[in-house]
Image: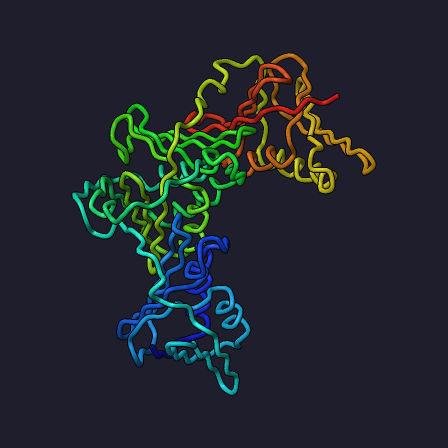
């Protein structure tokens, strides 16, 4: 295999595909590599850990078509240190040579025969296509990602013929949604269900839910028929974060779903990920049916004050922000042991009994950042029960926070 390409283009595809490469040595050496396939002037680069697979495509000046398996980390480091300009890559049975000007790197390649067969949805099966309003989908993904359960091992390629749903969404809106949604995802692999995003058919539309057990984000999309009645899927938030990286200025994202797999296609990238299997927690019982206390406040002013309070929690992650709510105002307070203290009062509309309630500083600011509205409402019952944050005059989204006990 032999070709020439622009250094920036190669670095982009190598970096993106490399984020799916396995970091576990027990997976075998083949999965630490990137699979290169050159067909005329189209180069395809694939990385996988068997749970998630990212395939990137780019145009090159092809010389000799072929395929190779090259160590991902070393190749990425080598391409990164070259200056901008053209690179020449030539691969033999033993080595991949990367050249530019007088610089020459030789990298030992892996056996391409060891690359596993990775099931893809492809074009197989009977595909039913439904349309989702792009703004609705954006808003949903904006405000909800995070939860999951470990994925089952791959059996064979039978998944290829079981595509059940295919839908297109506006890429720009979806990208904005993902920016706001992936905040809530759990990264605790010992609780795999809480590392995915639940997408479930709800009444006449779609509901998206994410929780790490300390907070929860939920968005309802009326009139969206992505899933059949009573159908639900869990998509790993890790995959959604990688998707967001590649959306850029793209116009459209295609999502395909099968019984075990979700596949996203955008521009030159295809990302395939196994769905999480398991029964999602009964999140609805966490949401209070009514509230005694309601605070309405300017979101931006509240957020800026919370960010200032959070400065004192940088070295003490467990230090909460306490909110003292009374008629006409809310006071934010932080008492960080051996660090210092801070307080700030903000004008607000408050109905209820004077009350003090405290929240994890990071979770509070995350909620304020993703609840995109000029004014937000914080609803609570007492200092030890869940509180709900939502935009004023919008019931389609809520962000639930578990309070922190303050002594």
Horizontal side of 344 relative to 251 (left or right) equals: right
Q: Is residue 190 visible?
A: yes
Question: Residue 59's x, y, as percent?
Answer: 33, 71
Q: Is residue 11 above or below residue 147?
A: below
Question: Residue 63's x, y, as percent?
Answer: 31, 81
Q: How is the image coloured?
A: rainbow
Camera-side residue: 4 or 289? 4
Camera-side residue: 207 or 110? 110
Task: Point out the residue furthest to the right here.
Answer: 338
Question: Residue 302's x, y, as percent?
Answer: 62, 33
Counting labels gives 0
Placement of the N terminus among the 4 image quadrants: bottom left
Task: Point out the residue furthest to the bottom here.
Answer: 102
Camera-side residue: 149 or 290? 149
Placement of the C terminus among the 4 image quadrants: top right
* Residue at the image point whose x is 62% and y is 24% from the top: 403
Question: Residue 350's x, y, as percent?
Answer: 61, 19
Camera-side residue: 336 or 62? 62
Quarter of the figure with residue 136:
top left
Q: Is residue 16 visible?
A: no
Q: Is residue 60 above or below residue 305?
A: below
Horizontal side of 404 relative to 12 (left or right) equals: right
Task: Point out the residue furthest to the left here.
Answer: 126
* Residue at the image point whose x is 81% and y is 38% from the top: 339
Quarter of the figure with residue 174:
top left
């Amino acid at each position: 295999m032999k070709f020439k390409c622009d250094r920036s283009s190669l670095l982009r595809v190598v970096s993106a595909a490399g984020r799916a490469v396995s970091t576990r040595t027990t997976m075998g050496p083949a999965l630490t590599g990137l699979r290169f396939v050159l067909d005329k002037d189209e180069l395809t680069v694939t990385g996988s850990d068997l749970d998630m697979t990212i395939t990137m495509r780019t145009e090159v000046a092809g010389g000799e078509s072929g395929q190779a398996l090259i160590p991902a980390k070393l190749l990425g480091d080598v391409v990164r240190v070259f200056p901008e300009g053209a690179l020449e890559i030539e691969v033999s049975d033993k080595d991949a040579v990367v050249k530019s000007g007088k610089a020459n790197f030789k990298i030992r390649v892996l056996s391409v025969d060891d690359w596993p067969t990775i099931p893809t949805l492809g074009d197989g099966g009977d595909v039913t296509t439904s349309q989702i309003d792009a703004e609705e989908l954006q808003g949903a993904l904006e405000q909800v990602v995070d939860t999951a359960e470990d994925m089952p091992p791959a059996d064979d390629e039978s998944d290829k013929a079981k595509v059940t749903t295919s839908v297109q969404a506006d890429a720009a809106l979806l990208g904005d949604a993902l920016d706001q949604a992936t905040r809530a995802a759990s990264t605790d692999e010992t609780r795999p269900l809480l590392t995915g995003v639940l997408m479930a058919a709800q009444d006449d539309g779609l509901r998206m839910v994410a929780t790490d057990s300390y907070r929860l984000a939920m968005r309802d999309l009326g009139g969206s028929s992505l899933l059949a009645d009573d159908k639900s899927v869990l998509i790993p938030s890790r995959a959604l974060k990688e998707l967001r990286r590649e959306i850029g200025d793209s116009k459209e994202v295609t999502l395909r779903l099968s019984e075990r797999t979700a596949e996203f296609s955008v521009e030159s990238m295809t990302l395939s990920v196994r769905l999480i299997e398991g029964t999602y927690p009964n999140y609805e019982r966490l949401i209070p049916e009514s509230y005694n206390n309601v605070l309405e406040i300017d979101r931006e002013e509240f957020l800026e004050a919370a960010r200032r309070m959070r400065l004192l929690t940088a070295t003490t992650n467990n230090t909460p922000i306490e909110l003292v709510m009374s008629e006409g105002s809310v006071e934010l307070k932080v008492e960080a042991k051996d660090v210092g203290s801070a307080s700030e009062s903000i004008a607000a509309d408050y109905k209820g009994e004077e009350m003090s309630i405290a929240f994890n500083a990071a979770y509070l600011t995350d909620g304020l950042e993703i609840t995109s509205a000029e004014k937000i409402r914080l609803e609570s019952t007492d200092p030890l029960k869940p509180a709900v944050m939502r935009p004023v005059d919008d019931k389609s989204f809520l962000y639930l926070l578990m309070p922190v006990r303050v002594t």
